[in-house]
């Protein structure tokens, strides 16, 4: 017998002398009312019970009775995507939960797998035992029946006494971990800032990243969790790990997430590709040029090539000092390796943090049904906080997992946005607009501090311009810390935009359109279009090509954008963005974003003020452009109004409400700017307004260009804005990643 209730007469008095059905049972146990062992050993850990241990009893017989641990609950609304709790309301069942705290100590030299909940550093865990009864059982009679047969969740032997439809649980604050695998091309899509900073300003970084090359990392997070053992049927045990609510106030520290590559050697091959991208010539060729420089045997042609490379690296002044140049080169090689590893780990940790902050309380992180023998092996590992070993044992024994975040998994390629997509809760998909709010509490107190996360997604898979297009906008607002009365200012903001064209064979004009989109969002410059097209054609070899253009604004940069949305010339900035976003066409006034801006921005500015009809736009634009030497005969085309997506008037026609979308976009930004000290309810209206401008790919392209110009006005300029252009040839596995260094 592990522990038992004594002084039953005294305890009974606080329970109703009535059936469990309909009784509201929530009572604290006096310290003298239960007898506990002096201490229980679990490997190097000792679980101590003393007079300060807190105990309580709770009863559950209907959905109105909420179990904070999530052990007892209702069937999920969607069983296909949500797991049922271990014990489910229904029929003639009721449960009494007996809970008690224990302090944990570790042997000298052994690190505790748990962390303190309270500021005093006292490490405690909560043990709970759930006993099933018919609903018509008298509460005091049920207490008497359970009093001498309470199971101690610390003891593996307690599994033998676990009845069908019963459970026991162990709740602690400790480290949870998952091993995840990503394709390197996913790592590079929004993390190239660290590498472009190794180049001189306005240099293009382009390197090969073969599809299928992967990297893995162990990602760890410290949080409150519960390990639950229940018996669904004789001879079987369900084992679950759930995210739990902290039991004590005071847990306010920022959510700690850490990622470490499981095989740092996998970075080596990537570094060589990255170095060649930084150099713009093969690594062996540069090494040979450097050796010849040291030997004073460079030809004039070789000197010219070397100087171009040195200028890219900012090493031009070192050409006459070969010793210093060699040292600078070796340092850059080391920096490149360090940064490639760091950006991979940053992708894992940021993605996991983003996902984890959106986990609702009582989310099941792990669930499996196993034999009694398997449960006996898992029990000491899970209760002892050794999650990694428990996962290895499950895999070795081939246990079937009903749901699992805490396991090694191969990440689906081309994850988008901020997500790592480790769980079924990840939002995403097609043709949707959704803002999801998740509220987490740091204790069971009624007015406990909260940690709130918002995920806003607007995505589509079809475009009026091209039938293979997908675009998405991913808006995030989350808090790392718990706060009593959070405001908008307490949130970490972010915005991610994606334009993607699925794999298919493309004409030269279609490739130019894809490259043009990358220029609009600053991943390339106009002057680099021909070189980028050459590389794409060589890699494709006539095969199908997929393209992705991505733009990501971090918290600091997005807040700069929000502040400058109030600038008096913001309408003119958006007019320039609309002009740049016009579709590429092979005439002088339409084949470069900068030229489109100079020709069409005044017209878009007038349109935002006057909101012309498509017919009026055709007449006005044609008349305005007929004397522009860059437009020439194309002015006549601009005067036509067909059913295409080419002319100014046709763009207005196929993208109705552009003026309203602009007003919504600015209003959403100003809502966030002007309500920093208001409650997070502001986000719902702001996201609704912002997302109106992301319903069409043309408006999304213009929004991205608008954000870029406002971001450039901030204190950090464009240096912190992630912009990447990725071209993939699925048939060969070839992938080229492009990005631009910015001051």
Image: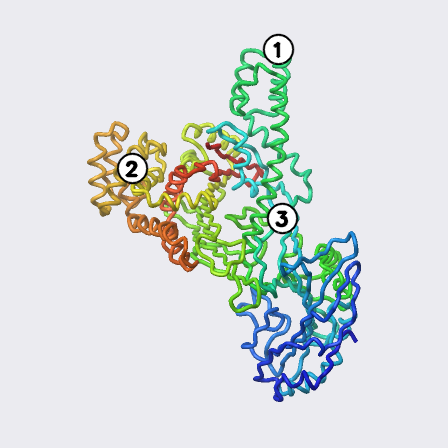
Q: Is residue 142 left or right of residue 544?
A: right
Above or below, comparing residue 684 to residue 346 in the picture: below
Task: Please name whichever residue, 167 or 669, is drawn nearer the observer in this view of the structure.
Answer: 669
Pinpoint residue 317: horizontal percent, then vertical percent.
54, 18
Residue 601: numbered disc: 2
Classify residue 7 by image quadrant: bottom right
Q: List the residue tagged with mark 1.
A: 297
Distance in Å between CA atoms under marks 3 and 2: 46 Å
Q: Is residue 675 left or right of residue 449?
A: left
The answer to whether residue 339 is seen in the rendering is: yes
The crowd level at tag 2 (other Cα within 10 Å; few <14, some 14-19, many 20+) is: many
Determine contact: label 1, label 3, CB under 8 Å.
no
Above or below, comparing residue 26 to residue 449 in the picture: below
> Under tag 3, what secondary structure?
strand
Determine contact: label 1, label 2, CB under 8 Å.
no
Task: Please name whichever residue, 343 or 498, is drawn nearer the observer in this view of the structure.
Answer: 343
Pinpoint residue 349: horizontal percent, then vertical percent.
59, 48
Distance in Å between CA atoms under marks 1 and 2: 53 Å
Among the two numbered marks 3 and 2 on one chain, the one whose residue lies closer to the N terminus: 3
Among the two numbered marks 1 and 3 on one chain, the one whose residue lies closer to the N terminus: 3
**Which one is in front in this view, the residue at disc 1 or the one at disc 3?**
3
Q: Is residue 390 left or right of residue 73?
A: right
Q: Residue at x 44, y 29 (%)?
A: 528
Q: List the residue tagged with mark 3.
A: 258
Distance in Å between CA atoms under marks 1 and 3: 49 Å
Among the two numbered marks 1 and 2 on one chain, the one whose residue lies closer to the N terminus: 1
């Amino acid at each position: 017998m592990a522990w038992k209730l004594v002084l039953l007469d005294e305890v009974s008095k606080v329970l109703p002398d009535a059936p469990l059905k309909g009784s509201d049972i929530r009572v604290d146990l006096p310290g003298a009312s239960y007898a506990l062992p002096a201490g229980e050993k679990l490997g190097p850990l000792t679980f101590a019970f003393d007079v300060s241990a807190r105990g309580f009893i709770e009863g559950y017989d209907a959905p109105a009775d909420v179990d904070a641990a999530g052990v007892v609950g209702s069937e999920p609304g969607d069983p296909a995507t949500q797991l049922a709790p271990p014990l489910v309301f229904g029929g003639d069942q009721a449960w009494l939960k007996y809970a008690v705290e224990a302090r944990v100590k570790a042997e000298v030299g052994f690190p505790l797998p748990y962390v303190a909940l309270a500021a005093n550093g006292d490490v405690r865990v909560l043990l709970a035992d759930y006993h099933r009864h018919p609903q018509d059982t008298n509460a005091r009679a049920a207490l008497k029946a359970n009093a001498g047969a309470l199971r101690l969740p610390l003891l593996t032997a307690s599994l033998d006494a676990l009845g069908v439809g019963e459970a026991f649980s162990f709740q602690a604050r400790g480290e949870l971990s998952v091993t995840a695998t990503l394709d390197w091309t996913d790592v590079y899509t929004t993390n190239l800032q660290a590498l472009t900073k190794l180049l001189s300003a306005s240099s293009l970084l382009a390197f090969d990243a073969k599809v299928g090359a992967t990297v893995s990392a162990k990602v760890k997070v410290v949080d409150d969790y519960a390990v639950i053992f229940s018996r669904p049927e004789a001879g079987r045990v369900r084992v679950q790990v759930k995210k739990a609510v902290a039991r004590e106030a005071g847990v306010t520290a920022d959510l700690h997430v850490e990622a470490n590559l499981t095989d740092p050697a996998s970075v080596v091959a990537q570094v060589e590709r990255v170095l060649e991208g930084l150099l713009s010539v093969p690594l062996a060729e540069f090494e040979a040029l450097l050796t010849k420089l040291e030997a004073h045997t460079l030809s004039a042609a070789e000197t010219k090539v070397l100087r171009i490379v040195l200028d890219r690296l900012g090493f031009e002044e070192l050409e006459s000092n070969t010793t210093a140049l060699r040292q600078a080169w070796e340092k850059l090689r080391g920096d490149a390796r360090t940064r490639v590893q760091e950006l991979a780990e940053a992708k894992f940790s940021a993605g996991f943090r983003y996902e984890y902050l959106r986990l609702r309380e009582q989310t099941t992180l792990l669930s499996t049904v196993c034999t009694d023998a398997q449960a006996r092996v898992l029990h000491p590992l899970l209760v002892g906080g050794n999650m990694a070993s428990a996962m290895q044992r499950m895999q070795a024994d081939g246990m079937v997992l009903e749901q699992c975040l805490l396991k090694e998994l191969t990440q689906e390629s081309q994850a988008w946005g901020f997500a790592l997509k480790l769980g079924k809760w990840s939002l995403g998909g097609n043709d949707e607009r959704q803002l999801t709010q998740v509220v987490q509490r740091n204790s069971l107190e009624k007015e406990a501090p909260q940690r709130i996360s918002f995920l806003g997604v607007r995505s589509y898979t079809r475009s009026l311009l091209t039938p293979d297009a997908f675009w998405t906008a991913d808006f995030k607002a989350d808090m790392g810390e718990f706060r009593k009365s959070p405001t908008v200012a307490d949130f970490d903001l972010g915005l991610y935009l994606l334009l993607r064209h699925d794999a298919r064979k493309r004409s030269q004009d279609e490739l130019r359109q894809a490259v043009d989109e990358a220029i609009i969002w600053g991943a390339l410059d106009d002057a680099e279009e021909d070189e980028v097209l050459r590389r794409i054609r060589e890699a494709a070899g006539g095969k199908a090509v997929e393209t992705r253009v991505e733009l990501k604004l971090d918290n600091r940069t997005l807040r700069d954008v929000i502040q400058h949305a109030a600038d008096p010339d913001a309408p003119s900035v958006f007019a320039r963005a609309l002009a740049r976003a016009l579709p590429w066409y092979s005439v002088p006034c339409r084949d470069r974003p900068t030229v489109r801006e100079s020709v069409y921005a005044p017209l878009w500015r007038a349109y935002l003020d006057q909101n012309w009809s498509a017919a009026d736009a055709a007449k006005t634009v044609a008349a305005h452009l007929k004397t522009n030497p860059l437009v020439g005969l194309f002015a006549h085309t601009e005067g036509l109004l067909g059913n295409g997506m080419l002319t100014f008037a046709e763009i207005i026609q196929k993208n109705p409400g552009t003026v309203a979308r602009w007003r919504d976009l600015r209003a959403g930004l100003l809502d966030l700017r002007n309500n920093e000290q208001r409650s997070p309810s502001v986000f719902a209206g702001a996201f609704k307004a912002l997302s109106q401008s992301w319903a069409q790919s043309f408006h999304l392209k213009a929004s991205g260009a608008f954000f870029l110009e406002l971001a450039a006005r901030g204190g950090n300029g464009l240096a912190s804005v992630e912009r990447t252009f990725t071209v993939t040839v699925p048939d060969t596995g070839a992938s080229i990643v492009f990005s631009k260094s910015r001051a």
